[in-house]
Amino acid sequence: MQLPLKLAKSLEKRKDENALRSLKKNAQLIDFSSNDYLGLASSAKVYNGAHQILEQNNLLRNGATGSRLLSGNHKIYDLAENFLAEFHKTEAALIFNSGYDANIGFFSSVPKRGDFIFYDELVHASIRDGISMSNAKAYKFRHNNIEDLKIRLNKLSQPENSEIYIVTESVFSMDGDLAPLRELAAISEDFKAFLVVDEAHATGIFGENGEGLVQEEGIQDKVFARLNTFGKAPGCHGAVILGSKGLKNYLVNFSRSLIYTTALPPHSVATILSVYQEFINEISEIQQLKNNIHFFRNQIEELEIKKHFIPSISAIQSCIIPGNEKVKNIAKILKQEGFEVKPILSPTVPKGSERLRFCLHSFNSENEIREVLKKLTKLLP
């Protein structure tokens, strides 16, 4: 059957912009692209730990059998959510099927008509999509710019009974830089606003045992809601919203992406619990990742290519190479040399800020880091 004309034109436009996406099989290359920052996606210890948890709780089954409000709320959920709440020093935790589901479910249901959302202009797509489903009015502020946020808040004519939500990522997914969380917490207090922080790229990396940047900064009691995902550093699947018991109760009653979907199977939840039990044990991978980040930053300075990179102390290191065709070609050459580094194209990022995004891992060797950067140096203008 022929594709509708508007859809065909959209695809043709993507081709013309050299930005057409496709699904590709994973090649066996040196990994500088995946979100598996700690290598836990292939951890035998985590895998066996999850199986042991299932056996201990007599949950050797393949599926959840229904939504959490029907038949899918197996006891493993209580075990995991109680563990997560204690680990993250919060009253309650609510597991969602993915980070996307969590953001859609939160922002489509929590901010109400008459409320106001102020969000950092670089928050990722799932937050934006959730906000677009909300009946609240939404305004973006300049990236990590506290003064711009203050100006916008001061201009606000706030009706009685309306609420303000301030939204950011703690570690930004495309730039890898950090949000000024303490300043955002202070301004939230000043304006009686509710601070919401997406910790997707901080979970498992920042904090003493991978708790995230909010806890590293010690401001967990000043944050209304945190979203921590499990598909990145924890190496498994799903996400959690952390907050008060009242917030959890509200989401169970009004978050459509939780209510109207089949729950995660017990094995997925057991894997989350197994990973977090490893975090408690102070796994060495977290420190090794931090060492690799430090080594990477030293190397780009030694090779005199630091000016091409966005400043970052996270696992995400982005090299700006303007132009979809140019950045794709450099990524292709690195791939031929055995390195998987993904090009990030416009319109995912603004035109002119296309980039190679290096995702660093605990399992990358210093020699791998040194070699890929030497090869990159020869390709940069």
Image: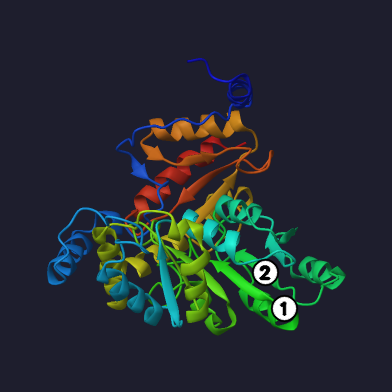
Q: Which residue is drawn at 27% across and 77% down?
A: 281
For the point 52% across and 72% down, the residue is 250
Where 183 sits versus 318, above or below? below
Residue 184's image quarter? bottom right
Q: Which callout, 1 or 2, points at the residue further toward the start of the chain?
A: 2
- What residue is disc 1 on? 187
In the rendered picture of this protein, how many numbered marks are placed on residues?
2
In this view, the mark in front (1 or 2): 2
Residues at badges 1 and 2 in contact (C-beta under 8 Å)?
yes
Residue type at tag 1: Ile
Relative depth, front residue between 379 and 74: 74
For disc 2, the marked residue is 166
Mark 1: secondary structure: helix
* Residue furthest top as drawn: 2
Specify the quadrant of the image occupied by residue 291: bottom left
Which of the pair 291/62 is nearer the observer?
Answer: 62
Which residue ends up furthest to the front in the rendered image?
70
Which structural element holds mark 2? strand
Is 363 above or below relative to 326? Answer: below
Residue 210: numbered disc? none
**Three-letter code, disc 2:** Ile
| Residue 233 in which image quadrant | bottom left
Residue 76 image point, x, y percent: 26, 69
Please report the residue visible at 38 percent of the width from the left and 61 percent of the height from the top: 230
Q: Is residue 281 above or below residue 9?
A: below
Circle 1 crowding by C-alpha within 10 Å: few under 14, some 14–19, many from 20: some
Q: Where is residue 3 in the image (x, y as percent from the top left)?
A: 54, 19
- Work out whether residue 377 can be spotted: yes
Q: Image point 46% across, 43% down: which residue?
A: 374
**How far is disc 1 from disc 2 in space, using C-alphas?**
9 Å
Point out residue 7 in the picture as x, y percentages from the top left corner.
59, 25
